[in-house]
Image (spheres, rainbow, N blue to C red):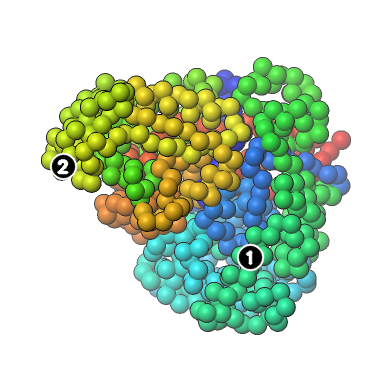
Amino acid sequence: MRQSSTRKPARAAKLATTAGACAALLGVGGVPASAAASTTSLHSATRAAPSGGSVTYAEDPDAPPNWIMPIVTPSHLQAYNTSNVALLYPSLYVYKSTANGMVLDNVDSPANPPVYSAGNKTVTITLKPWYWSNGKPVTSRDIQFWYNLVRVEKSNWGNYSPGDIPDNIASFTILNSHTFRVALTKAFNPSWYTANQLTLINLMPQAAWDKTSASAAVGNYDQTSSGAKAVFNYLVAQANDLATYATNPLWQVVSGPFKIASWTNTGEVTFAPNPKYSGSDKVRMSQLVEVPFTSEQAEFLALRSGSVDYGYVPAEDIPQESAIEQQGYKVEPWWGWEVTYLQYNYNNKQAAPMFAQLYVRQAIQDAINQPLIAKSVWGGAAVPDYGPIPVLPKSQFLSKGETNNPYPYNPARSQELLARHGWKEVRGVQTCERPGSATNECGAGVAKGAKLSFKMLSESGSPETSAQDDYLKSAFASIGVSLSVDEEPLNSVLAATVPCKSTQDVCNWQISYFGTQGSWNYPPFPSGDQPFLSGSSGNLGSYNSAAADKLIEATLTSSSLANVYAYETYMAKNLPVAWLPNPAFQVSAISDHLKNVVQNPLLTFTPQSWYLSK
């Protein structure tokens, strides 16, 4: 799941202490399905908890939630969207962080643990006795409905990567109303498949949604390709109408712990308990209200007034942290299972020839002083990223090689690289003087007179992001690379940052930054099939490397960590993106009255487990 929004860290000393705690929390680190699964509820404390009360949760500045359909489109993959969807339409399998690591939650997952057979080429899944809010049972047909829509509209599904689900499913067979069998195209690593594939399947009510218009009767349209496309298009059109979320009959049929009470175009969302929820944790609060803000300071004023139960402390307000704690809040960072980077567009007509040159990417990376950014911009509350595996929380996936920066800050080397390949500064901007494909020339496709001058889209609403943008402009200028920055609301940046072809108008973006809270948040197994595999909808910049594809594929079929290490070493050196320090997801301020809050590194949240106490 790509994560992005705009609230930022707090005091470095406090974060350093909690970073160790987070590392301990994950234990062996995102160890996926094969780790011992949780056989007891991870939220059992709520069973005897008091009931009632309204809980207010602060949204990110300029980043209102804007999606509801379980099949999330590429431009709606923000963490706040996927988290809200999960409150209404849970995933087939749920992972939770415990003291023993990231484990499959066997109690609160809607299905029993999957059974692999035929040399890991077949998966048999039995659903638990769950119910929709209209009283009808969740059945195998509901899962088939999800599969049929995704199968024909995979290019419009934000989590699609070529070769992954649904491509890796050879057949889907319903055995009975609660059991189905999936034949895979080849043997897969069960740990990866359960953690990163089966968790992508959300419950969808076929008996309520299998229709092509509001006036059409429910049928079995999804059983044909043309019918499935018509159903998908209808549902997407309805999901684009935010103002009707609380009144549209489609979205009133849910299976999660909450249902929608109200939803505004400005982003204020109110959830009420779903009395038909089948999970172990019955919602204790009377309602959950997600409150939008136009800036971090507006949120902080609300926090100081006590009108927010779960908010965040902007970095510039760190001096007031003790006052917030004295006011009745617990302040602690939320570290995500994620990496942060500048996204290149390898298909932009003007910039692509330059981005295609490894030495250009190396020169840019050499000009980025990650330790300095982490200290001066993020107040020490960020860790340098040198490759595709998260540095925090610590995990078995992080190799020693990735912890050593292959491109330490060296602007002199940047300039030497560019000069060696035929570039010369003209009025402060590196200009190609020796076009061609020889080792001392600018490279294939780079024309004589081409300039290293780029435009960057960056999310607005965060002083830290703006400060980092200013630093990058200055750092790039020091080596003769011109960078202009256009800051826009997060949703606008993400809507513009899409995979594209050079001939398309939407391909006019060149560099994008949507990483104020991390650019890519991983599922339990941090594989590269979504953000970096050729053709993946999550591969926003259309990075294309046959060598990288081969290394990524190896991590999906074998449980050997050697394959993961080989993949991350290659990506750290090949620089598909420009790596930047990864800040804490946020520094949370949680009311002392709000209990049983777990800040999951997967960036999911489970308000059904929260409760208010006096």
Q: Position of residue 521 (x, y in %)?
A: 51, 45
Query: In the current view of this chain or complex, which residue is farthest to the top?
Result: 319
Q: Where is residue 71 in the image (x, y as percent from the top left)?
A: 58, 62
> Closer to the N terminus: mark 1 or mark 2?
1
Q: Residue at x 74, y 74 (%)?
A: 136
Amino acid carrying mark 2 in the image = Gly
Tell me: 492 left or right of 545.
right
| Quadrant in which the C terminus appears | top right
Image position of 173 with respect to 356: above or below:
below
Amino acid carrying mark 1 in the image = Ala
- Is the Cβ of the residue at disc 1 closer than 8 Å to that at disc 2? no
**Within 10 angstroms of label 2, few (less than 14), some, or many (20 or more) residues?**
some
* Residue 417 showing in the rendered view: no
**Within 10 angstroms of label 1, few (less than 14), some, or many (20 or more) residues?**
few
In this view, the residue in front, 178 or 257, is 257
Name the element at disc 2. Answer: loop
Q: Where is residue 61 in the image (x, y as percent from the top left)?
A: 65, 37
In this view, the residue in front, 96 or 299, is 299
Q: Which residue is drawn at 24% across and 36% down?
A: 449
Q: Name the residue under label 2.
A: 436
* Residue 58 showing in the rendered view: yes
Q: Where is residue 502 in the image (x, y as percent from the top left)?
A: 36, 54
Q: Residue at x 82, y 41 (%)?
A: 612
Q: Residue at x 39, y 64 (%)?
A: 163
Give residue 237's mark.
1
Mark nearer the viewer, 1 or 2: 2
In this view, the residue in front, 202 or 373, is 373
Corner quadrant of residue 278: bottom right
